Image (cartoon, rainbow, N blue to C red):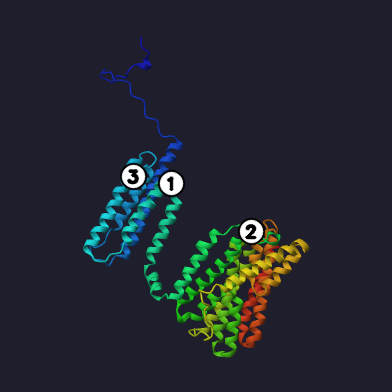
Amino acid sequence: MAHPANLGSADRHGKAHAACPPLQALPSGPEMLADLSELTGIGLALALGLLIGLQRGWALRDEQPGSRFAGIRTYGLLGLAGGIAGDLQTRAAGLALALLAGAAALVVLGYWRATQRKASISGTASLTGLLTMAFGFLAGSGELVLASVAAGVTVLILSMRGPLHHLLRHIDEREMMAIARFALIALVILPLLPDTPFGPYGAWRPRQLWLVVVLVSGFSFTGYIAAKWLGPSRGMLATAAAGALVSSTAVTAALAGKLRDDPSAAPIANAGIALAGGIMFLRVTLLTAALAGFALPELIKLTLPGMVASLAAAAILLRRAGGNLRAPDGLKLRNPFDIGPALLLMVLTMALTALARWVLDSFGDAGLATVLAISGTVDVDSAIITMGNLPAGTLGPQTAALVLILPVALNTLFKTVTALGLAGRRVWPGAAAMLASLVATAAALPLVL
């Protein structure tokens, strides 16, 4: 006789029922996480497509109906198509390829039809559609961060159409040559240089030395463009900030000299001196991050208070200046095409680096601090670059921060004395701002000690 457990159940009318089939097993934890990961990627692909479509729809909101290549829904679907293709590529490569090819063909066909209606048409919309599919494909493939960053940068570039066209209309041949030269030194020469040590004490590395030229030229050109972008109404402050990206000492001396000759420019000139001091602290922090990153966590504890004090003083002085934003006539931006100062700094760095290695080998850390402090009195950058070229582990982060803040402090004192010597009492507000930055830096020393 069959076991009761094997018999089908019977209802109250006596009809027998077959035994119920077993239930399907629910997905286990790892399988469920994998499913959620796939859905996350595809969902992100759709979201990125809608984001790009939102920007395109807003940018073309004044176009006549039917004249646009695609709208927010189309871009969202292009992102979704890319996401599905990215998810399918490992399991159904043929289907994924067909989906991408079909969507791309529709984009190209849409562009072709648009050219039939208009004699002149931008390819931005079509190219953006193809990029949207690519971002969706990355998201569907699991590259969520790369897809998000690339889509965000794309939206930013698309949103900057007006400012970029404005810049293009106002750029001259000299500035275009400056851009080309910077591209040459940063994107062509720098990657080709070796990073192996040579010279006395193995102190020089060609790539690191050329990075000095790239950074100084980059700071100079960025400041030049920023000053030109802000226009004449803020010309003095923009020029002071731009110049301080290269040499706050030169800016302070120039402003103090003009203040001596033209007392009516005192409020705005003093604000420019304070601003240049704040930019100097910022530049020191950025250069340290790029060239001597091991010292940054401790050094920023000292540079941040000085920068805040300088910028706060500049804001106060600017408020006192009111609407008088007239720039001293003789303060001009340096030619961005000229890389002579950057090359000179590189040569100075080579000499200081070799000297620092010899001093370190002969006299230890105390001698090194003396060399960097003296060299940094006029040019703080040289001290930072020399620190970055020392062998790894030569100085600990705390010692390195203290060694670097010394030339910063001496440079600030040097600028204060220089300004007072050139303009006397007229420059007291600017000098007080520089001294306040020193006090703020000194007050932060216990954080490092």
Q: Which mark sits nearer the N-terminus, 1 or 3? A: 3
- Residue sitting at 44 percent across and 50 percent down? 144
User: Of the residues tagged 1 and 3, which is closer to the observer?
Assistant: 3
Q: Which of 72/254 is in front?
A: 254
Q: Residues within 10 Å of mark 2 (few under 14, many from 20)?
A: many
Q: Quadrant of the N terminus?
A: top left
- Residue sitting at 23 percent across and 65 percent down? 118
- Residue 352 position, x and y percent, is 68, 68
Mark carried by residue 20: none
Q: Residue type at mark 1?
A: Gly
Seen in the picture, residue 10 relative to 356 is either above or below; the reply is above
Q: Which residue is mark 3?
A: 97
- Residue 271 position, x and y percent, is 56, 80
Q: Residue type at mark 3?
A: Leu
Q: Which residue is mark 2?
A: 294
**Separation of disc 1 and disc 3 at Cα?**
17 Å
Q: Which of 243/59 is in front?
A: 243
- Residue sitting at 64 percent across and 76 percent down? 436
Q: Quadrant of the C terminus?
A: bottom right
Seen in the picture, residue 422 relative to 199 is either above or below; the reply is below
Q: Which mark sits nearer the N-terminus, 1 or 2? A: 1
